[in-house]
Amino acid sequence: MKVMVIVKASESSEAGKMPSQALLQAMGDFNETLVKAGIMEAGEGLKPSSEGVRVRFDGRDRSVTKGPFAETNELVAGYWVWNVRSMEDAIAWVKKCPNPMEEASDIEIRPYFEMDDFAGIDSDGSVREQEDKLRQTLSMQKAQSNCYLFFSGRCDEALEYYQKHLGASVGLMFRFNESPDPIPEGMLPPGFEEKVMHCEFRIGDMKIFASDGCGDEGPFTGFNLTLTIDSEDEARRVFDALADGGSVRMPLEKTFWSPLYGQVTDKFGIGWMVMLPSSDTNPQ
């Protein structure tokens, strides 16, 4: 379940008093624990209400009032967005939080509405459909696209050339003989064991992925585009859409570098790699 964890304002936070270094470090450590546990989606602190405004709605009228606002116990000083198993799980995590204020303080936990909560109102499903489309749009706005180049055994040569003439900087790289998973028998031609299985390099602000491939790419006639999408449902939807009228070269499946990865050539002949971002931690 998705919850917002709300840090209520206090006299010190409304006065604009900054936290001590010790508290700042303690909150940073707590946030790191949340991230490692896989439950934290977002978290921010807010400046005092003296730097904010309120917009009041009354029919068609709109009026703006500048802060500060008097009701300290009704104000928000910060928040997290968590994905937890239950409200009891959220309470347990909040109890581990350092006191965010120098005085007594309150943290409120509020569950998010889900579309199932509106089933009685949205009888024809039109609002759910609209919401699904908006979620798809938001997921795709955050998707990352990179070119993936295959050099048919000449990747090292190409990287050296790009470094010399284009100022390329090479980051992550591993070879077929460094793979933690065994390479399927017959997949590689003789002598490809030390070839580049995957690497990442930059030219200017452009990040490019590259590989020697499996030796069967033939002449360099094109490239693959990669899409890294942070939603499994959206990754599957995009993969299926690209496969419609095209061909699946590798079905979506778990790999050692991605929770979900697949290759597809669309009906226009463009090669795509669709994947979820890798993660070193699992949700608790």
Image: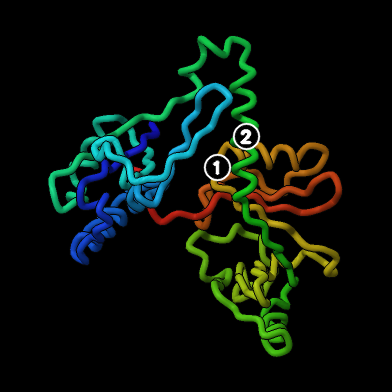
Q: Position of residue 85 (x, y in %)?
A: 33, 33
On the image, numbered disc 2 is attached to which residue? Answer: 134
**Dot 2 surroundings within 10 Å: few (below 14), some, or many (20 or more)?**
few
The residue at the point 64 percent across, 18 percent down is 126
Left or right, 76 with reference to 54: left
Left or right: 214 with respect to 180? right
- Quadrant (top left, top right, bottom left, bottom right) of the N terminus: top left
Residue at coordinates 63% horizontally, 37% vertically from top-left?
136
The local secondary structure at tag 1 comes to loop
Q: Which mark is residue 231?
A: 1
Residue 262 on image: x %, y %: 64, 48
Q: Nearer the viewer, residue 238 or 210?
A: 238
Q: Residue at x 41, y 47 (%)?
A: 52
Residue 96 is left or right of residue 194, and the answer is: left
Which of the pair 237/63 is nearer the observer?
63
Q: Residue furthest left?
A: 104
Q: In the picture, residue 162 is in which quadrant? A: bottom right
Quarter occupied by the C terminus: top left
